[in-house]
Image: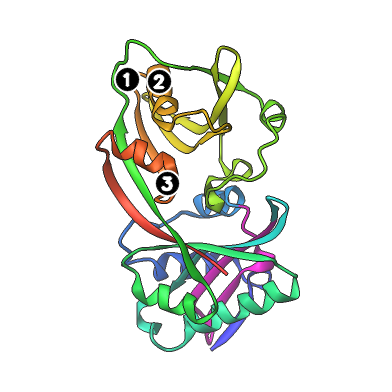
Amino acid sequence: MNIKSMLHCSIHDALTAMNEGFQDYSIDIQMTVDEFIQTMASKKLSPEYSFVAYDGETPVGIILNGIQQVDGKRMSYNGGTAVHPDYRGKGVGRELVQHSVDLFKEKQVEVSTLEAISDNTGAIRLYEKYGYSIHDRLSTMRMMFEEREDASYTVELITLSEWKELDVPEEPVPWQNKIPFVDHQEIYSIKDNGKTRGYLVLSQQLNKFLTLFQLQAVDEEASYDSLLSSVEHHFSGYRSVAFNVPLKHPVYEAYQNREPQQIIEQVWMKN
């Protein structure tokens, strides 16, 4: 078995390792070349920090990593580890994770993070062997924003610069939900008589469909139920997916009160 930096591999080999490694996964992760490149870019993953495993000339596994300055810390993110079904249980995943951990140490990474499907116990045990532990669980939920006649707060689109003026110390969400890593991001201030009570981060798709990445209070007086009700009022009639909501976060209960349909649950791990 040979582990190579993705810098020294063809895009075809990397994509082959990715698609074949995820061919029997519980969710569909098969990609075209363009989709693979866009995923790398949007999640801030880098060939410089990623690895491909080979058996001879055949790519049989891959790990995609990124390193960024996040919330004031040098942080790494594992955006996907995939091993061909015929090569599982043979140490391929272990070698890919070991190479990554060694690289993170060399690059002076302070926090390493990843997400894994909750029922993927083999992957979770592997990461635990390398010092990762479950920080929280993440739920992705689907719901419909019903018509509401009134709302406690107003919802206004703002710029990234205006969001930065809120001086939010940390975004308490996983890597993919943080503002710098959200494609086609829209940021909304949620206000009460001109005072900002919270903010919302989402992206819009066609046919009145939203993906919600964050709903955060910025003061102790804000009720998450009121924040969400105001968002529902503003986007009445939209279908929505709340993506990677941490179960320990107070917004989770507000979502649960709407009786959403759970799509998938993951674990959020840190090292």
CA distance separating discs 3 and 2: 19 Å
In what quadrant of the picture does the C terminus appear?
A: bottom right
| Residue drawn at the location 67% of the way across and 79% of the way down | 102
Residue 267 can be seen, yes or no: yes
The magenta segment is: 44-68
Residue 131 rendering spot, x and y as whole percentages = 55, 77
- Observer-side mark, 3 or 2, equals 3
Relative horizontal placement of residue 169, taking residue 240 as reference (left or right):
right
Q: Are marks 3 and 2 in contact (CB under 8 Å)?
A: no
Determine whether label 1 and label 2 are within 8 Å by CB: yes
In the foreground, 151 or 96:
151
Quarter-of-image position of residue 170:
top right
Residue 84 visible in the shown view: no
Upstream in the sequence, badge 3 or badge 1? 1
| Local crowd size for mark 3, using a 10 Å CA cut-off: few (<14), some (14–19), many (≥20) | many
Horizontal side of 180 relative to 243 (left or right) equals: right
Q: Which residue is mark 2?
A: 235
Determine whether the residue tagged by mark 1 lies in a helix, strand or loop: loop
Q: Nearer the viewer, residue 242 or 100?
A: 242
| Of callouts 3 and 2, the N-terminal one | 2
| Whole-number angstrom distance, CA of label 1 to CA of label 2 | 6 Å
- Residue at point 49%, 70% (across, down): 133
Question: Residue beneath label 3, please?
Answer: 245
Inspect the image, locate mark 3, and give the three-letter code of the amino acid beneath it: Val
Q: In the rendering, at what x and y percent does residue 210 appear?
A: 41, 31
Up the image or down, 205 lies above or below 125; here it is above
- Mostly what secondary structure, the magenta segment? strand
Q: Name the amino acid, label 2.
A: Phe
Q: Which mark is residue 237?
A: 1
Pointer 2 local density, CA inside 10 Å: few below 14, some 14–19, many at least 20: many
Is 58 within the magenta? yes
Badge 2 element: loop
